[in-house]
Amino acid sequence: TMAPAGMSVASKAPLEASFGHASTDTKPDAGKTLEERDNGLETEELSEAALRKLGVPSDDIVDAFKVCSDSAQNDEWWQQRMSNAKRNKKLLPARIRAGKSSKGVQRIQSWWSPLLIASFLIQGKHMPPTKAVRILNESFPDFSVDSHLLMP
């Protein structure tokens, strides 16, 4: 399977899944999320610099992609979905690394792909395509794309 420049074949399956295309990849990693595979490394082992090449912390996603105009409602909307990502099969491919809740220690945020979050919002009709693409390009320029790639 040929992947676009800058994207490994291994990372292509979640992108296709987010657009509703079935993957024909028969490799052992087929169907796994970015979180479950990252060039054979556990994402917990990756440095923040390495994680930044794959995605951003959950707070950055919540702050940029405002689904609700009220800040508290927006936080709750994202909390409900991100904390239950395994149950939300359409959002799970966008998660790069699961977070860990704080138990008296520093909270470890989950990490997410802004591109796949934008796709999730568009496909689920949670946000107009033009708004999602604008936010992606303005807030996450390292992950920006031509708008036609995310339009349904």
Image (cartoon, rainbow, N blue to C red):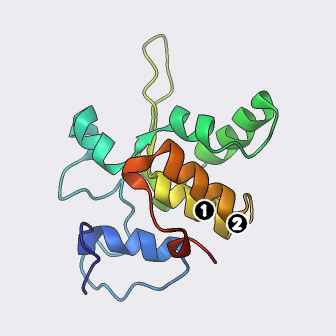
Residue lying at 79% horizontally and 42% vertically, measured from the top left? 68
Give the amino acid at mark 1. Answer: Phe
Pointer 2 local density, CA inside 10 Å: few below 14, some 14–19, many at least 20: few
Residue lying at 61% horizontally and 74% vertically, measured from the top left? 151
Residue lying at 19% horizontally and 50% vertically, measured from the top left? 41
Q: Quadrant of the C terminus?
A: bottom right
Residue 4 is drawn in which quadrant? bottom left
Residue 147 shows in the view: yes
How far is disc 1 from disc 2 in space, using C-alphas? Answer: 6 Å
Q: Quadrant of the N terminus?
A: bottom left
Q: Is 43 placed above or below 149 here? A: above
Residue 91 shows in the view: no
Q: Secondary structure at mark 2?
A: loop
The tag on residue 86 is: none
Where is residue 127? Give x, y as percent: 72, 58
Question: On the rendered structure, is 103 left or right of 131?
Answer: left
Question: On the rendered structure, is 107 left or right of 49?
Answer: right
Residue lying at the far top of the rendered structure: 104
Give the amino acid at mark 2. Answer: Gly
Q: Secondary structure at mark 1?
A: helix
Residue lying at the far left of the rendered structure: 40
The tag on residue 124 is: 2
Residue 13 is drawn in which quadrant? bottom left
Near-viewer residue (76 or 54)? 54
**Residue where numbered disc 1 is placed:** 120
Residue lying at 28% horizontally and 33% vertically, measured from the top left? 48
Pointer 1 local density, CA inside 10 Å: few below 14, some 14–19, many at least 20: many
Where is residue 20? Give x, y as percent: 55, 80
Residue 132 is drawn in which quadrant? bottom right
Q: Are marks 1 and 2 in contact (CB under 8 Å)?
A: yes
Q: Is 65 placed above or below 147 here? A: above
